[in-house]
Image (tube, grey):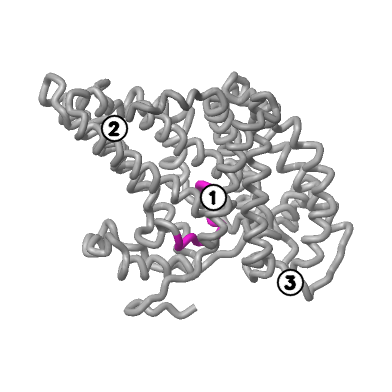
Amino acid sequence: MTLNRRHPERPRSATHPAVAAAGAIGFLCAILALRLLRPFNDGVLYSAVFVIALTTTAIFVVDLGWQKVHRRASTGLDPAHNDPSWPRTFLKLAGLLGSIAFIGLGYWLFPEYHGDLYGNYRDFLGLLIAPWLVLALPYIYWVDRRMRAPCDGYWQMGMLVTMRWQAIDRGALIQHLLGWTIKGYFLALMFSYMCNDLKWLLLFDFGSLYRFGNTYEFAYRFVFFLDVGIATLGYLMSFRFTDTHLRSAEPTMLGWIVTLACYEPFWSLLSRHYLPYDTGHPWGAWLASRPSLYIVWGSTILALSAIYVWATVSFGARFSNLTHRGIITSGPYRWTRHPAYLAKNLSWWMISVPFMPRGDAWDTVARCAMLLGVNFLYFMRAKTEERHLSRDPVYVQYALWIEAHGVLRFAKRLPLLRHLTYKAPQARGATA
């Protein structure tokens, strides 16, 4: 691909805005049906499965039926190619079983996953594993016969578990294992958060929303419920046929460290002992005696939170941390490369107001410095993501377009905020 740095064009988004809208509408319709019909008597596990199923259906009906994503070259599938192979299929099935065992070993080994937080997730895996394995064999066979380069991550894993190590591409195998580590870690966390939020929503009393404070609290939590719901779907629905498969996983230790630091159980340790920027006197207490400013301030926080969740929704079924699953150029990504990080970090300054004096002036300075430390953590996440995605020329074209047309285009004058130089794409290790 030739890149015109002077007059770049915005590339087409991997997820069309209509697909993202369909996902959001499907999600909201599922919640409405659960509230009105109570089909599972407020049972959280089956309600969560219902939400995921309806949202997924809405996304893939538009993505497959209208966008025809299964015909994209990026799937690695060629309808004209027909090379069926049962031995290769069973080898990949062995690779799938080995991948599941790899994640299962982590769940068994680490005490974190034995606690109450992951109870619903353990039950979910019990529901999922049997139909997953039944459908895996015909799916792998069908996909494999259409692949011009069939030695994917599952093939590499199959070679590993059958002890044919001499033929393994170590780089592709490592990418496959990194991808499954990402799926295992984040799916457990996001599904558990989703269930907790869904339980809250099913029992919520909407009659309390006559006060702005209550409306704010509801809207703020619901935004993040929608966020973890779409994220859960993204980690589950990783298929080559739908072009939602993993192209590559973050290859650097720095990228992993700065990302995992923002999630449990690592974030509790970091925020409690190293970056406790919260004063204990949030914006609501600060502005309680100024009702007009209270409403404006709270509405601004909600607007920033809406931008954050809009960024997640824009991925459709392609959302995932630490991975490349297609370049998103629509939604808020139409205006800046990192809308979610920008909105989230700005909202934290407004929520915690660490700049408001609470006693000693040096304590105020320290808390502001600690929040700046959190901001820097997300800045490093953004830079490592750019470095990873810049192996794809589509992302480079998008980044150059943003530098010319984005709302923060003035930032390109600052070396730290300028887009990284282009790196040759690496296609090894893509996983179905």
Residue 178 visible (yes or no): no
Three-letter code for the amino acid on which mark 2 is drawn: Ile
Three-letter code for the amino acid on which mark 3 is drawn: Asp
Q: Residue 320: say if magenta.
A: yes
The residue at 48%/64% (across/down) is: 391
Q: Quadrant of residue 361?
A: top left
* Residue identified by numbered label 1: 319
Q: Could you tell me how far apart the alpha carbons at marks 3 and 2 are, in whole angstroms? A: 51 Å
* Residue identified by numbered label 2: 351
The residue at 70%/59% (across/down) is: 152
Range drawn in magenta: 319-330
In this view, the residue farthest toward the left is: 361
Q: Position of residue 194 (x, y in %)?
A: 56, 33
Does residue 247 appear to the left or right of 263 in the view shown?
Answer: right
Secondary structure beneath dot 1 equals loop
Look at the picture and state if 154 lies above or below 211: below
